[in-house]
Image: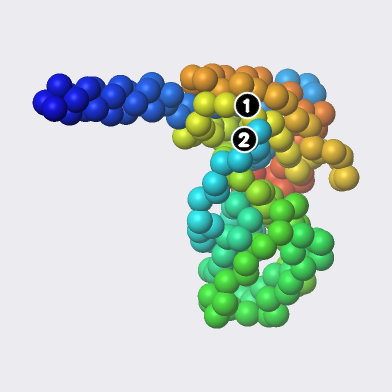
Amino acid sequence: MKFLRLAVLAGLIGSAMAIGGARAATLQVELSSKTGSPLADAVIYAIPDSKTPMKAPGTAEIDQIKRTFVPKVTILQTGTSVTFPNKDNIEHDVYSFSPAKTFELKLYSGVPAHPVVFDKPGLVTLGCNIHDQMIAYVMVVDTSFFAKADEHGIARIEGLPPGNYEIKAWHYSLPDGTALPSRRVTISTDQTIKFPLDAASGGSGMMGMMGMMGMSGSSS
Ligand SMILES: [Cu+2]
């Protein structure tokens, strides 16, 4: 009897260790343009081959500060509620014509009464009806595993259970309507991959234009 209990206990410890051994890993992705420069604000997401339950969708915030959407790029899980606080002392009118989410927050100041729920996957482009230069992007994805690249073009997806994944990437300088580039990876432990995109450099084009308009962009 005593022996049996011990055996069961040993079995339990064994399986706990097995679970502990198959630890969640971090995938680091280095995103670069066709000319090899880092792609700040690129987004990546990982779609597991095996059915993995998604987290409950959360909330996010996209501000309007000095006639600019902050942040310019957001990636979020389908079902996330987003508030759009206007932190300027002028009114803005936030809208999207994108099929994944069509909406308009008519001229307002302060915080709109209701958040916008991004309930379908896809790319949503935001604008302001008053200020044509205001533009932002929301990538809505059907997975909890996603990340956005920092100014060095590095994005990290943490907490990936071991397994096979399709990694997809996007950057706003990719030509409109491009099929999202994708990669296959097998996750067993932390790893780093390079992911060049057929995109213009993050330091020119849009960012350069923003610089010329005196908006906050990164250096050239
Ligand atoms: Cu505006």
Q: Residue at x 51, y 50 (%)?
A: 55
Report the front residue among 20 and 27.
20
Q: Residue at x 70, y 70 (%)?
A: 94
Q: Residue at x 63, y 56 (%)?
A: 78
Q: Residue at x 45, y 29 (%)?
A: 24
- Check the image and report above or below for 116 versus 39: below
Report the front residue among 151 and 163.
163
Which residue is the extreme one toward the left?
2
Report the front residue among 21 and 31.
21
Task: Name the secondary structure under disc 2.
Answer: loop
Q: Position of residue 97 (x, y in %)?
A: 81, 65
**Quadrant of the snapshot with the C terminus:** top right
Q: Residues within 10 Å of mark 2 (few under 14, many from 20)?
A: few
Q: Position of residue 111 (x, y in %)?
A: 53, 75
Image-based side of 160 in relation to 130, left or right: left
Residue type of the residue flagged with mark 2? Ser
> Which of the numbered marks, if any, corresponds to residue 164?
1
Mark-to-mark CA distance, 1 and 2: 8 Å
Residue that mark 2 sits on: 50
